[in-house]
Amino acid sequence: MNKQPEKILITGTTGLVGTRLLPRLVQAGWDCSALVRGEKQVQTGVTAVLGDLFDTESLGEAVKGVSAVVHLAALFRTQDTDLIWKSNLEGTQHLLEATKKYAPDARFMLASTAHVYHSDSPHPGREDDDLSPQHAYPASKLAAEKALQNSGLRWSVLRFPFVYGDGDGHLEMLPQHVLGKWHPAARMSVIHHLDIANAVKMALAGKFDGRVVNISDEAPMSVYELLRLTGTGMESSSEPLTNPWYLQVDSALSRSLGFQPEVRTVYQAMQENLL
């Protein structure tokens, strides 16, 4: 590994992405610290740093000496829109201020979402699209992106689509969200946890500095196909599909910067027992 940070701070390490990203970064040789609240246990090889995104003093201690921050922590599974904004925007702002004060040379990577793109987009979501999401979660994440871009730090933003794999149960949760609501031909871009780790490693190495980058595999999948993989049937339909590009992203930029997914399709993940 070339020019790896001596120490990185990671937030959101108990979440869907964080629990699967952290061991891969440790295995790759990074010196990982995890921001945790209370007495939560951390994985072997990880240093627990007690702190909270709303405790600015603890954030100052957490970022001292780090060469990079990987900010995964986010809130979206709640109807409390005020709390979503507070967590996703204000929490990010607090972490940015602490980093600027105590680790101004650190690289800061923010995990964001494909949900920022408009549902009626005439093409797959592109990083340079004009965006104005209406729902609290994508709107707050976009605001956090802008706060990072204006922070003066070295930064990158990775926008992830539907995340799956490593037994995370995310595919199995899909039926409750789409049955009776989605057209079976609706397609989504997806990304496996293994390739999230690969993309984060590239961000930590500076490959995405100063850029917002979509990260996805090579084959958007229809919800009809995805549900069949979970053993759930979905009623067929030949009715016209509205908003055909919703939740699909254009990943040309990431490819031009050197990102190539190891898990190219969900079918590959199934064949290699990576679901």
Image (spheres, rainbow, N blue to C red):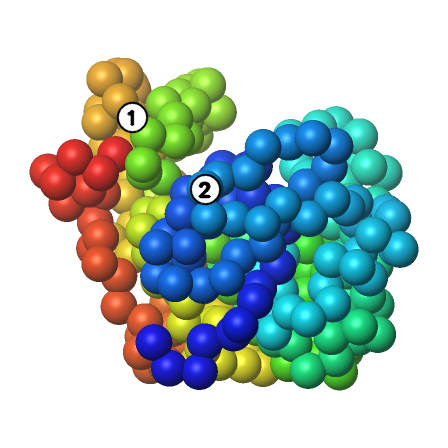
Mark 2 lies on a secondary structure that is loop
Mark 1 lies on a secondary structure that is helix
Return the residue at label 1.
Answer: 227
Return the residue at label 2.
Answer: 44
Residue 94: numbered disc: none
120 left or right of 149?
left
Above/below status of 180 relative to 134: above
Above/below status of 124 relative to 165: below
Above/below status of 179 relative to 53: above
Q: Quadrant of residue 4?
A: bottom left
Can you tell which of label 1 and label 2 is closer to the viewer?
Answer: 2
Whole-percent x, y for residue 55 in the image: 87, 48
Which residue appears farthest toward the left when viewing the image?
Answer: 271
Whole-percent x, y for residue 116 in the image: 60, 55
Whole-percent x, y for residue 12 in the image: 61, 45
Circle 2 Cα neighbour tier, 10 Å, few/some/many (<14 / 14–19 / ≥20): few
Mark closest to the chain's N terminus, 1 or 2 = 2
Q: How far is mark 1 from mark 2, CA to CA?
A: 35 Å
Q: Nearer the viewer, residue 244 or 113?
A: 113
75 left or right of 200?
right
Look at 52% across and 74% down and name the residue there.
5
| Dot 1 amino acid type | Leu
Q: Nearer the viewer, residue 250 or 145?
A: 145
Where the C terminus falls, by quadrant? Answer: top left
Q: Nearer the viewer, residue 30 or 194?
A: 30
Whole-percent x, y for residue 257 in the image: 36, 81
- Can residue 247 be spotted in the picture? no
